[in-house]
Amino acid sequence: MSDHKTDHATKMTWVPEASCGMARAGHLHTRHGTVPTPTFMPVGTVGTVKGMTMDAVRSTGAGIVLGNTYHLMLRPTADRVQKLGGLHRMMDWPGPILTDSGGFQVMSLGALRKLDEDGVTFRSHIDGSKHRLTPEISTDIQFKLDATITMAFDECPALPATPEALRKSMEMSMRWAARSREAFVAREGYGQFGIVQGGTERDLREYSIKALTEIGFEGYAIGGLAVGEGQELMFSTLDFTTPMLPQDKARYLMGVGTPDDLLGAVMRGVDMFDCVMPSRAGRTARAYTERGAINLRNARFAEDTRTLTPHDDTPVAGRYSRAYLHHLFRANEMLGPMLLTWHNLAYYQRLMRQIRAAIVDGTLDALAVKLREDWAKGDW
Ligand SMILES: CNc1nc2c(CCc3ccc(C(F)(F)F)cc3)c3[nH]c(N)nc(=O)c3cc2[nH]1
């Protein structure tokens, strides 16, 4: 058995196909299949994309789904997921799975957290039981989950924060990144992503990228954003951050975003995205369409026989009227959130396919103008 440290298994790779300005189109090759980028990854927090069967998720064109260390370590526990054959088998998803390392969720969901240099101690938001996460524990949990892409264990500081507080937090996250890499078991087609921190400070982002690229990861996430800084500050941070990242590795902007966020971030060199918005909106009667978002609980839809979108490329879009969806939400029927989550995820995947095609044929700027015009028009 080779010592996994020296094991030269070819880990996952990202291969460029085309570029248009800062935007890139490529393919992420992994042990569980190849995914075209840019790509939007549906959030599958506790081993399910809420309200969706995996067949439905696949029908939208999704390539990678997300899972979460924080939630799964609490329930059903990493040992049980491992006993059940890992996340792929448990949730019947043969494609790549990316798991977050849990630190972000501890700070946003966990109770009575105690953060120290070694890691974080917290109480479960489910039953109050005491738990600990460190770079080593998080990396080991992600191994047991059989994550295709493992995220380094980091701290995502709340914004606004002073440059001094951001520097201290980022430097600790870089020490945790080294420990996460040390604990990572290299396997053919699997990979681990480092997470760039440093808030909106150029010098801190530069320091963080230097630290992570010296350690060496299969991909790099841009963390510490989409925490209330607003789109303008997020974009200006991307403007100086993505050019400093390795050209030949995938970039993942964590927690982003609205359709307009995705478009702007792809144009600033980002390849991978995750966001709870399309699925959470689907559960709250908010539908994303080519003309912006609409709230289907609104009485104006009660007899609107039109479908949500002219596209009929999913079992939802071409079949159900707004009036029917309005009725389902008013009646509090579970089919409402199911159909609308399906529609919203399909809309996000269609948007990413449109953006990718425009990068390949060099028409991204024209597409951006058209998309923003239509979103601004509002419902037809
Ligand atoms: C919403 N804004 C945001 N989300 C952020 C996230 C969570 C991303 C995530 C991953 C997986 C799931 C899963 F539930 F589907 F599994 C859910 C959410 C971050 N995660 C880490 N590690 N560092 C960051 O610095 C960071 C910054 C983030 N800004």
Image (spheres, rainbow, N blue to C red):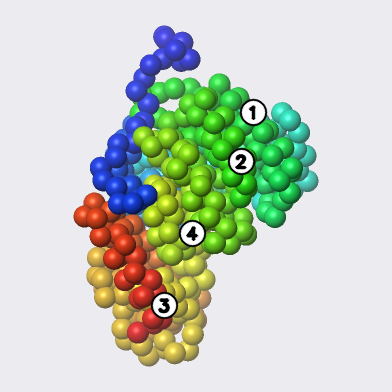
Which part of the image, by quadrant, shows the C terminus? bottom left
Q: Residue at x 40, y 23 (%)?
A: 187
Q: Looking at the picture, how far across and down is residue 199, in whole percent?
A: 62, 47
The residue singled out by tag 4 in the image is 257
Q: Looking at the picture, how far across and down is residue 366, in whole percent?
A: 29, 66
- The nearer-to-camera label among 2 and 4 is 2
Say if disc 4 is inside 8 Å of ligand 1. Answer: yes
Query: What whole-number distance in Å separates the C-alpha atoms at marks 1 and 4?
Result: 28 Å
- The nearer-to-camera label among 2 and 3 is 2
Sequence-wise, the earlier of marks 1 and 2 is 1
The residue singled out by tag 3 in the image is 376
Q: Which mark is residue 175?
A: 1
Q: Amino acid at mark 1?
A: Arg
Sequence-wise, the earlier of marks 1 and 4 is 1
- The nearer-to-camera label among 1 and 2 is 2
Say if disc 3 is inside 8 Å of ligand 1. Answer: no
